[in-house]
Amino acid sequence: MGKTIIISNRLPVQLQISNGDITAIPSVGGLATGMKSVHSGGDSLWIGWSGLTNEEIPKELSPKIDAALKEHGSSKVNLSKKEVDGFYFGFSNRTIWPLFHYFLEYSEFELKNWEIYKSVNQKFADAIVEAADDDDTIWVHDYQLMLVPQMVREQKPNISIGFFLHIPFPSFEIFRTLPWREKILEGLLGSDLIGFHTYDYERHFLSSVRRLLGLDVSFNDIYSDERVIKVDSFPMGIDYKKFSEAAKKNEDTAPEDLSELQRRLYNHKESTADAKFFLSIDRLDYTKGIAKRLNAFEYFLNKYPEYKEKVRLIILAVPSRSNVPQYQLLKREVDELVGRINGEFSTVSWTPIWYFYRSMPFENLIDLYTTCDIAWLTPIRDGMNLVAKEYIATRTDKTGVLILSEMAGSANEMNEAMLVNPNNFEQTADALKEAINMPKEEQIERNSILQKRLERYNVEKWANDFMSSLLDQKSKDHSHVARRLSVDLMDTIIDSYKSSSKRLLFIDYDGTLAGFHKDPQKAAPDEELYELLDNLNNQKDTEMFLISGRDKETFTKWFLHKKYNMIVEHGVWISRGGEEFKMLENVKKDWMEKILPVLESFVDRTPGSFIEEKNYSLAWHYRNTDPDFGQKRASELNTVLTSLIGTDDLSVLNGNKVMEIKSSNVNKGRAAMRMYAEEQYEFVFAIGDDWTDEFMFMELPEDSVTVKVGRQKTNARYYVDSIKNVRALLSRFVY
């Protein structure tokens, strides 16, 4: 097993030059924390920019910097001031950042910055190639390095590459405005796995790939140049234990040991018994909606004047990109708004807004989280927003209310929070009032659910899930791609069929012989199909089986009188020549302990879904999820279970917004092989359209003619495009 190489714009250490010496201090940011489990020991390397330009590093100190970084498992990419200006402050933060956050009016499309962005991405790619072996695993992070995966792929075509985007991916209509849109997509598609925080971002990306590059996309797989790229969502968590334990320690602090900030907060709380503190913590960035929040607070005070002198808004705005013009304008706007609102509403004993424009030590953040009754976090657009998760983690008594923007990525996982549209002041004002008056019982009920989820899906699990998925993608064999069943191939197959003395045919029903309907009973066979099946069934020396996931009652009604051979419910029941259906296997339940954690992991990553445990089955319900996302997750769960249950004799049944896993000792492949073993067959044929048919394709002898309906990744040898092709194909077996 090779090493893991992590690549990000900045290294997880901060360099300090003092008296001609170098000190490297580990960072405490979210990414550095999250990657601890991946970036550990001597089997990993982190490549990035040190934070110092070439001009800032004396030549004699460069070796010392390399040595200091090596102690932290890191290696630097050297960048000049011009490169940092064009690549980071230019293209990354004046083009990609505003565009991907839907601030199209702030996006600058400067060719010069794009050229520098390309050249710097090439520098990072070259640094990776120099350090990497073919059996290494590469994980590239974020929007500054979107061209790196393909640049590495060109030099090391067989290496495993993952990419994670920590900001939103915009809708196609926004993304298409980027002049270099195809190049960005092609750069990302050098990866084997591309991760996003939410399904919405994933969906936007897949839409752009389909519409701009014209590539085949099947669920979350992209087919490109005989490669399969997987796209998935991995909502980033926090170091839950760190924040929870810090809050408990804060709670146990003796009064004389309290910080100055905590003492002031307590004093103000005690002066007004029923006062409520609103907390707003963000980087000073136009995407965070700080100015809108201030205007909404003013609207609230005017709409509900009874709360004057009973609430206080504490705003912590952390300085960010202060050399970019939009950020300078935002700083001025926020300063003026705070001054105006405080001037308008302040009394002798009350100032409505406390405004801090600075970063704060971790301990002071905990002071704010644990003291403030309501966290008010309403970005206009945000990739995730970890502050919302940090606030919930610190609420040791489970009280507190989180008001969260619908536009934050974390809103997808935090449905128990009060979700608002940051542009709707009326809704926001009402939410603030509701939060102030929310009973403690309801606060505890909401936060208990949130804490349990956040503790389970923490930042370490996020990193490990991504790496596991990347390694799984690496281990898959994508080389086998079915061939289209051309006329020449069909002629060869028919000749083989006719010359065989004993033949065996397995034919799926839904999606193969008949189309799908919202009401499954409306997919009944028509007269043309009956005639075709009659002719096949009457062929001399030919055994035909209809093999389906349908229930036996439906097939009894449709086909029993025709005396066809039938296998239904994925191999649970069999009927031969018109006899009543008989059960093939006994039912077991000892498999449930193994499958339950798999379903729980899908619940973690599929907001709105839940598990129903029954006596002999487990059901995963996804009616309350986003319909597209739920269907995609169901398909993914199908694939996971297909590989997982190989020897455990389970069947997976698809219902209406529910998947049920039942102990049955059967699948289509097993049933087909039992039929195959009964006689000496010279010609074996199987055709089907979905994942349940893959069992047949895998289990039947290698010289069998296996056909997939539709052009998806498959274990079948051939494929046809549609149901219409199926009937034309089967009709040629009749002579």
Image: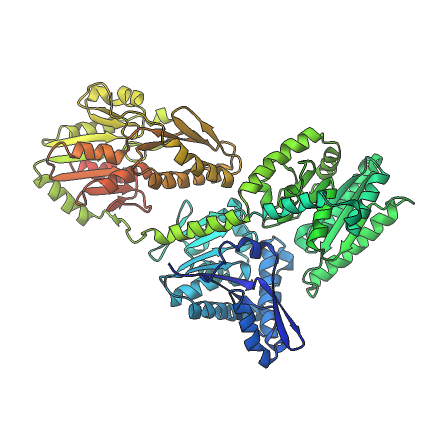
Farthest bottom residue in view:
60
Q: Is residue 187 above or below residue 112?
A: above
Closer to the camera in the image, 151 or 138 = 138
Q: Is residue 415 visible?
A: no
Closer to the camera in the image, 545 or 40 = 40
Asked where in the image residue 672 lies, by quadrant, the reply is top left
Residue 332 placement (x, y as % from top left)? 77, 58
Q: Is residue 81 visible?
A: yes
Closer to the camera in the image, 163 or 114 = 163
Residue 659 placement (x, y as % from top left)? 41, 32
Residue 582 placement (x, y as % from top left)? 24, 21
Query: How many numbered marks, from 0 up?
Result: 0
Residue at coordinates 70% horizontally, 50% vertically from top-left?
365
Farthest right residue in view:
348
Residue at coordinates 41% horizontally, 33% vertically from top-left?
593
- Quarter of the image where the C terminus is located: top left
Side of 186 where 449 appears, left or right: right
Q: Is residue 163 above or below residue 236?
A: below
